[in-house]
Image (tube, rainbow, N blue to C red):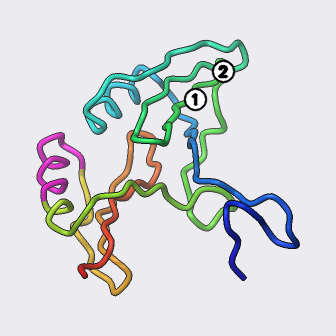
Amino acid sequence: MTMSQESGSAGGPGLGPITHVALTVRSLDVSVPWYRALVGAEPVLDEDTGPFRHVVFALGGTLLGLHEFPEGIEDLPHSPRRPGLDHLAFGVPDRQGLDAWAGRLEALGVAHDGVVDAAYGSGLSFKDPDGLPLELFAPPSA
């Protein structure tokens, strides 16, 4: 089954592109500088809404939000086998870009698993300060 943006299943509305992703973090004081170095840009929003504070980065047409809750969080280690987020992947144009990112992560002191190639593309996996799994992903070479 395929759905277009104009129409979904049974003629209903279709989904557009992902506009934002929000990650819950233990401490914005730790995570904001880490993501600022990773993204290479300043946040576009820093707002305390009352129920939570969030800091947001613009990544092309997608927003990446970091949320901190004043009452804290359930401090459980992340598991991709629990319902919810498995990992978040950021696009990189090509395999050479992944090699450049591997060097950048090393310069930032961020451990990674090295570039892994597969038929569907290549990925470079690492974790943020809270242990959330992140990936840089490039499509297969043409």
Drawn side of residue 52 relative to residue 39, left or right: right
Q: Return the residue nearer the eye: 31 or 36.
A: 36
Going 20% across and 69% down the picture, which residue do you hit?
A: 95
Q: Secondary structure at mark 2?
A: loop
**Measured along the vertical axis of the image, is residue 70 above or below residue 142?**
above
Q: What secondary structure characterizes most of the magenta part?
A: helix
Going 18% across and 60% down the picture, which residue do you hit?
A: 97
Q: Which mark is residue 142?
A: none
| Quarter of the figure with residue 12 | bottom right
Q: Secondary structure at mark 1?
A: strand
Q: Residues within 10 Å of mark 1 (few under 14, many from 20)?
A: many
Single out the residue that lies furthest toward the front: 6
Drawn side of residue 99 relative to residue 127, left or right: left
Drawn side of residue 119 relative to residue 109, left or right: right
Would you name the residue on which mark 2 appears?
Answer: 52
On-image quarter of the N terminus: bottom right
Drawn side of residue 77 relative to residue 28, left or right: right
Q: Position of residue 102 (x, y in %)?
A: 17, 57
Q: Inspect the magenta stretch and tell me whether residue 19 lies in it.
A: no
| Quarter of the figure with residue 49 | top right
Q: Which mark is residue 67?
A: 1
Which range of residues does the magenta coloring cover? 100-110
Q: Inspect the magenta stretch and tell me whether residue 109 lies in it.
A: yes
**Measured along the vertical axis of the image, is residue 126 above or below residue 95?**
above
Q: Position of residue 83 (x, y in %)?
A: 69, 61
Q: Determine contact: label 2, label 1, CB under 8 Å.
A: yes
**Which of disc 1 and disc 2 is earlier in sequence?**
2
Q: Position of residue 15 (x, y in %)?
A: 70, 57
Going 71% across and 12% down the picture, which residue do you hit?
A: 50
Type of amino acid at the residue the image marks with label 1: His
On-image quarter of the C terminus: bottom left
Q: Return the residue nearer the eye: 42 or 2.
A: 2
